[in-house]
Image (spheres, rainbow, N blue to C red):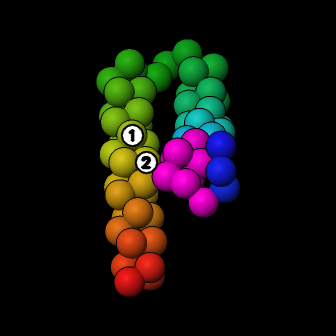
Amino acid sequence: MKKGTFLYRFFILLIAFIVLSAAVLLPLAAAKDVEPLVFWIIGGALLLIFIVTVVVNEIIRRKRKK
């Protein structure tokens, strides 16, 4: 995979968000009194932030190339 391609940037961001998600969700999973809805809300927020990050990153890169 070439270093400047979309897939490279996507996978780097994906790995970063997987690590961030694990750091946030694993301590919550260890707690016994956490509602399942909390996991869905935090997971959805992390997914939304990931999608926005990828889109904004690509928009910024396209504008710089012009």
Residue sitting at 43 percent across and 42 percent down?
Answer: 46
Q: Is residue 59 above or below residue 47?
A: below
The picture quadrant where one finds residue 37 is top left
Magenta stretch, residue numbers: 4-13
Looking at this view, is 18 or 66 the one in front?
Answer: 66
Numbered mark located on residue 47 in the image: 1
Residue highlighted by disc 2:
50
Label 1, label 2: how many angstroms apart (C-alpha)? 5 Å
Query: From the image, which quarter does the N terminus lie in?
Result: top right
Badge 2 amino acid: Phe
Q: x, y (%) of residue 17?
A: 56, 43
- Mark 2 secondary-structure assignment: helix
**Crowdedness near tag 1: few (<14), some (14–19) or many (≥20) residues, C-alpha within 10 Å:** some
Task: Residue 29: tell me if it is visible.
Answer: yes
Q: x, y (%) of residue 56?
A: 37, 64
Residue sitting at 38 percent across and 19 percent down?
Answer: 36
Q: Main secondary structure of the magenta part?
A: helix
Looking at this view, is 33 or 14 the one in front?
Answer: 14
Q: x, y (%) of residue 44?
A: 34, 36
Magenta-colored stretch includes residue 19? no
**Crowdedness near tag 2: few (<14), some (14–19) or many (≥20) residues, C-alpha within 10 Å:** some
Task: Residue 12: tell me if it is visible.
Answer: no
Residue sitting at 39 percent across and 40 percent down?
Answer: 47
Q: Is residue 52 above or below residue 46?
A: below
The picture quadrant where one finds residue 59 is bottom left
